[in-house]
Image (cartoon, rainbow, N blue to C red):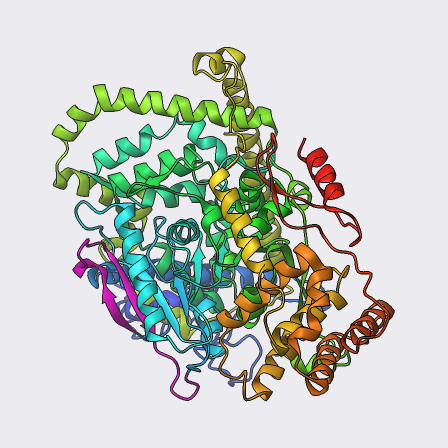
């Protein structure tokens, strides 16, 4: 009987190419194929017959030293078979690496939870105050960011306090990478603090408790840096922005400038066809769902629900682009993806009372700007804020569009003079395309906008009361005063009016009535829920059931599914190690790689079209329901005198305070010295000019540092003097300028003031003819010459009683007009 010869698996002609292709794509299978060959009886290597070890520089060689089978191509034409093979190898390897990143993401999620979900800051820090130990405990804490010892911080610079949003995720968004808000503050030499929070709220914790804790934290920072150049600047991101604004309204003396980034304050505002998220409250029937979710959580609301709403806004990114970007750039994107997911997956909890207050008073009720919020017996009024406010928003933000970030200005003030009467300085900067998260996490934003905010924060603190837009222009090293600008951009502040805010778009009165109807329907539905459903649900739910619901939430279960807890993921780590060792990335010009990209674009565009159709349907349904006259009549909006928003009403007590304040300032018209005289001359010389340039401010700061008598002056002290001179010049410029000689004791001080004024004005460029003429007028006045100043001025800032509420007289009049003419003009305008 003839003995049958045993063959190695790889000696079979039909298997040769298959084995070579398989081991090229997944070299980790090599040992298994080799073992199979040895089991066949001849101990053959897993290397296919006909393949030989090749030189390290050989074309087509893999990292394992084996040569990739090449398809014949005698005419050197495009070879679709070779391109397909190369792409297939790369695609399969990327798929293994993609699964490995998901496995690492799941394990990272559980490891972070086991550690108590600490802030995902890339900077070292120490805990200064633990909120859980306060008299009214809450889960917030104050951290001090430890600077690089080689750089340190400047004790003369004001501290910054960054408050992260508690809107589903954990703390750390303001500093989880070097190019961030914290990184920018530290590079500028400012002491930096961070207000974060723990995953679970304290029992019975309320928003008022959180506000008390934040006030205590900021007050403590101010005491630690009592000798700094100004009060702490507070940055509030997203949800933290409105919390900081509310705190400043209650404690106006607590903080310095406020920066609110991507923070909604006017929740109904938006543009028809572009901002669908504001309709969700109406389609859900109001805020009763938040109460239900809290009850199902045994009194605690799961932040994963908020994250889910956010993800639904952009299904293309949630369901495709985010994962595809990782898959397509798996060799370079993994670490960045995991860093972001560490923050994104840190879901936090709120007490039911907290989320219900937020939905009732803000998201649905829109009471932030109407005076409808009362805390500890005090009505919240944003007009009480005395700190300069810098609003940063973006047209690319679908969570907080510019209308929601700035609409509160229109809700609170009748005109610019109303803003000035409340001594408020409001600055806004609008990005053209960055998304909501990019406002906080984008390195590009941190290097440009955030850097300029920090660099010019003292200038913003000195701006006269009013409304301004912050404009950033690339710095030209050849322009005058370029050496005074530390950053890469020259910042100027353009005066704006309320019409500029209205020009951004917003609600019509009909739109407001729809949202007002939602607020009333919400109250009805929540009352019905609280009466008929809440007692039984609260009685049925216990903590194990609530924890089971949280664990099975798809936002969390996806991380468990792709973690080491899944036995099917066990071999993925070893497989990925083999792939990394034998990686064969495809050439960028591979036609199949281009086809992959085009298919991905088509999928994303299809999801975008579905999103647009969904949003359009949501908007039509909302308007169809809540714009119905019958529904509005049923909820009481059709009654005479009923409106969607409360009208502007007179505040006689405030009017009396304004008049008293103006009288006190006018009584000091002949008081002061070189500093007051310099400010009056500068204001007069720049009369009629719009933008304020940072170079002039930097020159003022340089002059202050050069003079021994003014080096000790803080920004707060200079701000108080400057604002008083601004109001003097607004009320009676002629009287203020006529008093100049009484402020200066001799010829030396007069020359000094004129020289300093020219120096400051020339920092932004050569003097204009108008500036030269005005300076000549001042010089003539100081030397008692016949020429007198015929300057235009605004009439005295007085509060008039009118149907529209309190406003300030706004008209440029000649200094020789009589008080009677002022009264006639003012009365006509009030009517």
Q: Looking at this view, is 178 or 189 the one in front?
A: 189
Q: Is residue 238 left or right of residue 39?
A: right
- Residue 455, horizontal then vertical, whole percent: 56, 72
Q: Quadrant of the N terminus?
A: bottom left
User: Could one spot residue 438 in this view of the protein?
Assistant: yes
Look at the picture and state if 477 lies above or below 120: below
Q: Quadrant of the C terminus?
A: top right
The residue drawn where x is 54% and y is 67% is 719
Residue 130 falls within the magenta-colored stretch: yes
Q: Looking at this view, is 193 or 754 the one in front?
A: 754
Q: Is residue 332 left or right of residue 544?
A: right
Determine which quarter of the picture holds residue 100.
Answer: bottom left
- Residue 161, horizontal then vertical, whole percent: 39, 66
Q: Is residue 209 left or right of residue 823?
A: left
- Residue 477, horizontal then vertical, whole percent: 73, 80
The residue drawn where x is 25% and y is 70% is 127
Determine which quarter of the picture holds residue 767.
Answer: bottom right
Look at the picture and state if 489 lies above or below 812: below
Q: Is residue 119 left or right of residue 59?
A: left
Q: Looking at this view, is 340 or 3 the one in front?
A: 340
The residue drawn where x is 60% and y is 62% is 83
User: Could one spot residue 399 in this view of the protein?
Assistant: no
**Magenta-drawn segment:** 126-152
Look at the picture and state if 411 lies above or below 693: above
């Amino acid at each position: 009987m003839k003995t049958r010869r045993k063959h190695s698996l790889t000696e079979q002609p039909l298997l040769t190419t298959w084995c070579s292709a398989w081991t090229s794509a997944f070299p980790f299978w090599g040992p298994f194929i080799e073992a199979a060959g040895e089991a066949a009886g001849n101990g053959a290597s897993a290397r296919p017959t006909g393949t030989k070890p090749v030189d390290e520089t050989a074309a087509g060689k893999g990292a394992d030293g084996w040569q990739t089978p090449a398809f014949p191509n005698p005419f050197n034409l495009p070879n679709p078979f070779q391109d397909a093979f190369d792409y297939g190898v790369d695609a399969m390897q990327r798929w293994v690496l993609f699964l490995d990143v998901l496995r690492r993401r799941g394990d990272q999620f559980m490891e972070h939870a086991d550690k108590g979900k600490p802030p995902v800051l890339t900077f070292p820090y120490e805990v200064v105050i633990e909120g859980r130990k306060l008299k009214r405990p809450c889960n917030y804490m104050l951290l001090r960011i430890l600077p690089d010892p080689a750089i340190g911080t400047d004790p003369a610079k004001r501290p910054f306090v960054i408050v992260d949003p508690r809107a589903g995720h954990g703390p750390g968004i303001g500093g989880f990478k070097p190019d961030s808000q914290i990184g920018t503050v530290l590079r500028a030499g400012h002491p930096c603090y961070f207000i974060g929070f723990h995953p679970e709220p304290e029992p019975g914790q309320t928003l008022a408790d959180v506000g008390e804790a934040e006030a205590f934290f900021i007050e403590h920072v101010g005491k630690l840096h009592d000798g700094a150049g100004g009060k702490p600047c507070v940055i509030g991101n997203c949800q933290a922005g409105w919390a900081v604004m509310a705190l400043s309204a209650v404690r106006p003396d607590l903080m310095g400038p406020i920066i609110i980034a991507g923070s909604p304050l006017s929740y109904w505002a938006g543009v028809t066809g572009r901002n669908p998220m504001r309709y969700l409250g109406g389609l859900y029937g109001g805020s009763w769902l938040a109460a239900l979710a809290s009850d199902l959580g045994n009194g605690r609301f799961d932040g994963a629900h908020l994250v889910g709403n956010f993800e639904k806004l952009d299904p293309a990114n949630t369901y495709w682009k985010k994962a595809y970007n990782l898959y397509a750039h798996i060799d370079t994107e993994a670490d960045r993806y995991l860093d972001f997911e560490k923050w994104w997956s840190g879901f936090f909890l709120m007490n039911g009372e907290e989320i219900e207050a937020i939905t009732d008073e803000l998201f649905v009720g829109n009471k932030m700007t109407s005076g409808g919020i009362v805390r500890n017996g005090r009505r919240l009024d944003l007009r009480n804020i005395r700190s300069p406010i810098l609003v940063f928003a973006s047209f690319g933000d679908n969570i907080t569009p510019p209308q929601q970030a700035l609409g509160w200005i229109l809700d609170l003030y009748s005109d610019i003079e109303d803003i000035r009467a409340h001594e408020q300085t409001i600055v806004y900067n609008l990005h053209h395309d960055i998304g909501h998260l990019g406002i906080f996490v984008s390195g590009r934003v941190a290097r440009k906008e955030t850097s300029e905010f920090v660099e010019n924060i003292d200038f913003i603190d000195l701006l006269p009361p009013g409304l301004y837009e912050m404009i950033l222009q690339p710095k030209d090293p050849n322009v005058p005063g370029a050496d005074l600008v530390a950053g890469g951009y020259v910042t100027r502040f353009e005066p704006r009016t309320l019409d500029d805010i209205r020009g951004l778009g917003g609600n019509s009165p009909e739109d407001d009535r729809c949202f007002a109807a939602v607020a009333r329907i919400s109250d009805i539905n929540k009352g019905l829920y609280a009466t008929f459903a809440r007692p039984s649900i609260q009685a049925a739910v216990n903590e194990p059931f609530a924890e089971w619901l949280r664990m099975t939430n798809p936002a969390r279960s996806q991380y468990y599914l792709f973690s080491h807890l899944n036995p099917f993921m066990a071999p993925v780590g070893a497989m990925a190690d083999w792939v990394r060792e034998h990686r064969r990335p495809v050439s960028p010009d591979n036609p199949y790689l281009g086809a992959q990209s085009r298919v991905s674009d088509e999928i994303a565009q299809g999801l975008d079209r579905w999103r647009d159709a969904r949003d359009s349907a949501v908007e039509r349904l909302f308007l169809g329901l809540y714009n119905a006259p019958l529904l509005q009549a049923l909820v009481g909006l059709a009654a005479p005198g009923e409106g969607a928003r409360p009208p502007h009403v007179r505040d006689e007590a405030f009017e009396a305070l304004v008049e008293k304040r103006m009288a006190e300032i006018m009584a000091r018209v002949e008081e002061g010295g070189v500093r007051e005289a310099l400010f009056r001359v500068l204001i007069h010389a720049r009369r009629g000019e719009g933008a304020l340039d940072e170079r002039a401010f930097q020159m003022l700061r340089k002059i202050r540092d050069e003079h021994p008598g003014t080096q000790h002056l803080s920004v707060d002290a200079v701000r108080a003097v400057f604002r008083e001179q601004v109001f003097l010049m607004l009320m009676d410029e002629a009287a203020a300028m006529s008093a100049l000689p009484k402020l200066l004791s001799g010829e030396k001080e007069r020359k000094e003031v004129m020289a300093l004024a020219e120096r400051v004005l020339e920092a932004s460029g050569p003097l204009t003819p108008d500036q030269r003429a005005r300076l000549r007028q001042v010089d003539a006045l100081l030397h008692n010459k016949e020429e007198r100043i015929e300057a235009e001025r605004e009439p005295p800032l007085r509060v008039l009683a009118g149907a529209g509420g309190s406003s300030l007289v706004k008209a440029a009049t000649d200094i020789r007009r009589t008080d009677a003419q002022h009264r006639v003009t003012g009365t006509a305008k009030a009517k």
